[in-house]
């Protein structure tokens, strides 16, 4: 092993700074779910405003990831990270002291744009700091582990904050993290930029936003209200702009997104595997969370506690994935994880409408641990497959695919589950509102136990169907992983 490329104490200390950013961003997302009722009451937010308070962050984050990833390649990844950290800190203070819902929506949008600078810059810097493949795999696994730790700890941190302080404390929590980045970043993080990068093409920036924002908005609308004309129009418009974006990138000498990245089979295959895996897991989490609260009649707190083992399993698997990859090979670890996930999803095909909590939780633990293995090493594959000067672009594609995976998974799997639910109900119901969704059925059929049993059985069938399709997808991905990435292992 060439010790000249091994990272030292400075790089590992820098990783701790970058991991703190991942920890904060994941906590920040989950804390807001708890803070929403408090801030809505205080600010008098209407139902549509509440949705925008929640959604505008993810809209801006998804929309600007590609632009910010490429911008970091041009102006310097550390510089962009520090700019983003300062902006995130300022926007967090403004959000905490918002005087009305409109101000909070605007500051949440700023937080999303700032967040888009932090995520790809962090991963691209890891690519530059850890030149040894084994060390880089470990670093990315630890970074992702901190991200998942934040998701698991978010409800606990949020409960403690909101139990002692006002809702604005959920936003102020991020300020010390950003101060840490600003103070220690210049000393611990190296600067890196593409020396041959051209000017930023503003037309491409506009086209990328016009592609991503309508598609994400449309998918969220599908998940919320089904396929209606506004959602279809938004997705169609985004797709049309996407075609124009791709054509422009092919013509430019210095494109915003270098499509040549997709010519690398390992990069393209891993990105596709991560995207489809994210779609499956987002849909599975949606269906199982609804099952616990509506079919098993749990409170949100009870359901959240039953999901803790899933998060722990994912954190452990993310941490162990790089070590497994060094011993057995990346392709085999990723495929084994997908196979394990398929076993967990298969358990969900057997879940009954009564007493199925054990099967659901066991299936979630296996599926989450399974998908964590390819997550823990897949980003390392993509980052090593991409040239160092394109690390920002590669990281932004990884993060954008994650955002799309969640949006598509919730919309597609949620729509499939709803269609099966409605198809399982008889033609004539005592309360027709129960046909709309399992949530509506629980509300409308409180005094009609027979109808409630029918609705719960129908929803469970929808869960079983989604799980069956997800199982097939995971098995197929495992086969593709072995077929494509085994060659990458040999080359590496």
Image (spheres, rainbow, N blue to C red):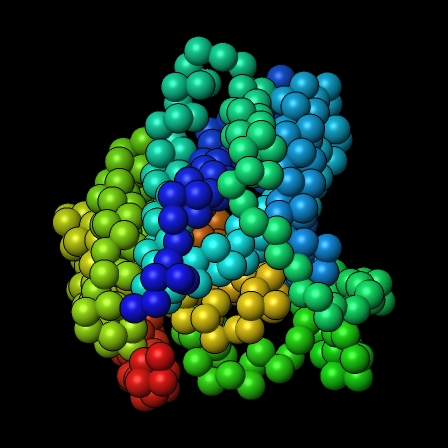
Q: Which of the 4 image quadrants contains residue 99?
A: top right
**Relative to 364, does residue 36 appear above or below in the rendering?**
above
Measuring from the top left, give residue 47's x and y in whole percent: 63, 35
Q: Image quadrant for the N terminus?
A: bottom left
Looking at the image, which residue is at 71% across and 66% down?
A: 195
Query: From what the image shows, is residue 40 above or below residue 480?
Result: above
Q: Is residue 124 something one can see in this rendering?
A: yes
Left or right relative to 372: residue 225: right
Residue 473: percent from left, percent from top:
34, 76
Q: Residue at x 80, y 79 (%)?
A: 252
Q: Report the side of 96 relative to 266 (left or right).
A: right
Quadrant of residue 394 in the image? Answer: bottom right
Q: 200 or 213, which is in the foreground? A: 200
What quarter of the picture does the C terminus occupy? bottom left
Furthest toward the top, the residue is 164
Q: Which of 26 and 434 is in front in this view?
A: 26
Identify the residue shown where x is 40% and y is 62%. 4
| Residue 38, percent from left and from top | 54, 21
Residue at 41% of width from left, 71% of height from top?
A: 381
The quadrant in which residue 36 appears is top right
**Count of residue discs:** 0
Q: Residue furthest right?
A: 203
Is residue 295 in view? no
Percent x, y of residue 142:
35, 49
In the picture, measured across the screen, residue 112 lies left or right of residue 415, that is right
Q: In this view, does 117 lie to the left or right of 282?
A: right
């Amino acid at each position: 092993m060439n010790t000249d490329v091994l990272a030292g104490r400075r790089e590992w200390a820098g990783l701790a700074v970058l991991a703190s950013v991942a920890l904060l961003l994941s906590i920040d997302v989950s804390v807001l779910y708890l803070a929403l009722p408090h801030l809505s009451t205080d600010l008098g937010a209407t139902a549509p405003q509440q949705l925008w308070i929640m959604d505008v962050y993810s809209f801006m984050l998804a929309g600007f990831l590609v632009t910010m990833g490429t911008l970091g390649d041009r102006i310097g990844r550390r510089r962009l990270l520090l700019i983003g950290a300062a902006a995130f800190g300022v926007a967090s203070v403004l959000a905490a002291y918002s005087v009305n819902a409109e101000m909070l929506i605007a500051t949440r949008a700023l937080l999303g744009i700032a967040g888009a600078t932090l995520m790809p810059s962090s991963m691209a810097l890891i690519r530059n700091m850890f030149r040894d493949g084994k060390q880089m795999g470990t670093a990315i696994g630890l970074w992702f582990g901190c991200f998942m730790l934040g998701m698991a700890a978010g409800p606990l941190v949020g409960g403690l904050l909101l139990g002692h302080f006002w809702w604005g404390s959920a936003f102020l929590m991020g300020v010390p993290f950003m101060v840490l980045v600003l103070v220690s970043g210049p000393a611990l993080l190296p600067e890196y930029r593409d020396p041959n990068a051209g000017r930023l093409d503003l037309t491409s920036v506009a086209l990328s936003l016009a592609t991503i924002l309508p598609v994400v908005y449309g998918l969220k609308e599908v998940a919320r209200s089904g396929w209606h004309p506004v959602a279809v129009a938004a997705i169609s418009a985004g797709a049309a702009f996407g075609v124009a974006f791709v054509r422009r990138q092919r013509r430019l000498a210095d494109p915003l997104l270098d499509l040549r990245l997709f010519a690398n089979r390992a990069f393209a295959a891993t990105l596709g595997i991560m995207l489809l895996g994210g779609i499956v897991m987002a849909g599975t989490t949606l269906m199982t969370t609804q099952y616990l609260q509506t079919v098993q009649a749990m409170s949100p707190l009870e359901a959240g506690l039953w999901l803790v083992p899933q998060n722990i399993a994912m954190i452990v698997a993310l941490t162990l994935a790089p070590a497994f990859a060094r011993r057995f090979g990346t392709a085999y670890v990723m495929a084994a994880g997908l196979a394990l996930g398929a076993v967990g999803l298969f358990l969900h095909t057997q879940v009954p409408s009564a007493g199925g909590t054990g099967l659901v939780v066991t299936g979630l633990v296996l599926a989450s641990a399974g998908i964590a293995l390819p997550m823990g090493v897949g980003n390392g594959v993509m980052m090593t497959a991409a040239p160092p000067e394109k690390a920002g672009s590669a990281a932004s594609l990884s993060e954008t695919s994650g955002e799309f995976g969640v949006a598509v998974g919730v919309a597609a799997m949620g729509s499939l589950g709803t269609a099966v639910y409605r198809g399982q109900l008889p033609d004539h119901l005592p309360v027709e509102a129960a046909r709309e969704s399992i949530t509506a059925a629980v509300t409308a059929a409180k005094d009609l136990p027979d109808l409630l049993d029918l609705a719960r059985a129908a929803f469970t069938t929808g869960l079983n169907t989604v799980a069956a399709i997800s199982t097939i997808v995971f098995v197929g991905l495992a086969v593709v992983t072995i077929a494509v990435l085994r060659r990458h292992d040999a080359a590496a």
